[in-house]
Image (cartoon, rainbow, N blue to C red):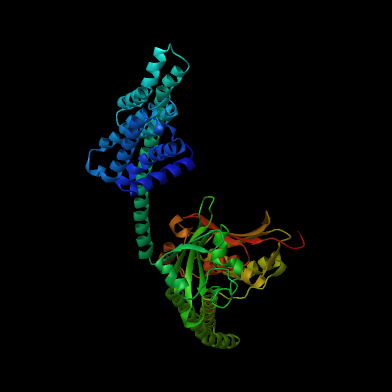
Amino acid sequence: MSANEQVVVQRAQKYLQRLRSTSRVALWQLPLVAAIVIVAVAAPGPWNSESARPLIIAGFLLVCGAGAACLTVPWDRLPEQTVLVIPIADLVSIGLIRNAGDGTLQGLGTLAVFPVIWIAVSMRSVVWTLVTCFVGPLLISTPTLTEAVRRGFPAGASYSLLLPVLMLTVAVAIRAATAGLRVQERLLRTQREQLRALLAESQSTERLLAAILDAVNVGIVAIGPDGLPVRSNRRFKELLAASGWIPAMSAGGPKLAFLAQDRRTPVAREQWPFVRAAAGERIDGEVYWLGTGPDAVALSIVARPIEGPEGGAVLAFGDVTALATAVDDKAELVRTVAHEFRSPLTAVLGNLDLVLESEQLTPDDRLRLEVAERSAERLLHLAADLVASSSNAIPVRLGFADLRPVLEGRADAARLAAVAAGVQLAVELEDSLWARIDPLRVGQAVDNLLSNAIKYSPDGGTITLRARRSEGWVAIEVRDSGMGISADERERIFERFFRTSEARRSDIPGVGLGLALCSWIAERHGGRLEVVSDPGRGSVFTLYLPASGPSD
């Protein structure tokens, strides 16, 4: 059975189920009554026969009585199989009408198909169904068959035998179709129950998921391939929707735009986290500002694409406004303190220079003044590092330059400190080291790397400054034979104010800003800073800068 036929059957069943029991029984009886009435009107001849009239009237009255019983008897209060009295009575009435008169109404035997269908559909027992559907039509044909036997089996006898066989075939077909429908109905009922169970489970899971998402203090939103939100939790609406941001690429555009971490630079539309995530990009903890003024919100965003043909992504928005504000306040405090340090230190260094120019100083006094001058210079450098590390807006002016002179100059400046520390400094530089750099900032990074190598190397150690071109990069390598760094601490050495436990135990001066500044300078040049180290065997810091220039 096709899908359309199943739909028709199901609709018919629903319609019948809504009817009362008497109405359903009357609908079964209606086709036969209508057919007999039409025959009576279309062929009134047999009614005029004195011999045929009693049987015809009896059959007609029996049919009409059965129809009246369909409408009046409360069938729902009786046993289910009681209603089969009606189609059996119909077989009797058809037999009376068909066999009345001179044989002109024998064609009415085919009307037995209506009660046969009724019996085949409604009777429970298969055996009794087939027996009734065969014997009933056979009894209807018995007078004709008896007359045929008496006359020596003329041609009409075959028709008399054909009627019960035909009705039996109809009954078998109806029974088989009904059985198939019942099997399909049971299957559909089972599937419907399974779907209901799945729907209930899905709704329960949906409620649980909604409760979990709403309980999380992070804004979570699922977007489609077009970048538009599909589903979100309560926190997302509080962070974004409530603040007036419209995610749709509408004609009016969003009310609020994303700003970069400096809170001033607008983020281009193609760099919005929604657009990037919809394109399949992963985002890990990037900070954006939404809005301006006192109502601005800092958001730490994580995005992951959704695997599958549907596409889309899931984004998580964490409100880090308090943290970002605290970091800005801390940076401002550091800049202020460092600035206040630099002014008196500059005065101290200037006066020390003037005093050291005097020829009246004794050697001991000069030595003490030089120690004071070096300490003041260290404080001045520390103040400069504090200012640099606290600012995200240190200017980097890129241009094509040869790194060799820059590195040679920094190595020459570090030799005096290396000699004073009892450390040998070796320099190995290739001839052409062109790159697009800011020489001042790169020199600053190399100064920090060499200074750290000197501080953390023992007397008699060796430091090597090496620079070479390698696969599109200029690699600046500073190798020392110092105390090294443990594996657990290597992951944190580029954090501001972090110092290794060995450095703290050794009372080596420093505040943990040099490597953080070097890493930041490398990133601003489009490069990176890497470290390889073993405790007790020294460290190798490698600064990678993109190579470009005349040699390319």
Residue ranking furthest to the right: 550
- For the question of whether residue 328 can be seen, the reply is yes
- Residue 473: percent from the left, percent from the top? 66, 58
- Residue 374: percent from the left, percent from the top? 54, 78
- Could you say which is closer to the camera, residue 516 or residue 249? 249
15 w.r.t. 91: above or below? below
Q: Residue at x 40, y 27 (%)?
A: 101
Direction from residue 218 to residue 422 in the image, left or right: right
Residue ranking furthest to the top: 152
Direction from residue 17 to residue 282 in the image, left or right: right
361 w.r.t. 97: above or below? below
Residue 503 placement: quadrant: bottom left
- Residue 55: percent from the left, percent from the top? 34, 30
Direction from residue 112 to residue 449 in the image, left or right: right
Q: Quadrant of the C terminus?
A: bottom right
Direction from residue 447 to residue 55 in the image, left or right: left
User: How many marks on residues?
Assistant: 0
Residue 174 placement: quadrant: top left
- Could you say which is closer to the camera, residue 438 or residue 501? 438
- Could you say which is closer to the camera, residue 107 or residue 528? 107
- Residue 112: percent from the left, percent from the top? 39, 30
Q: Residue at x 55, y 69 (%)?
A: 517
- For the question of whether residue 422 can be seen, the reply is no
Q: Residue at x 39, y 25 (%)?
A: 168
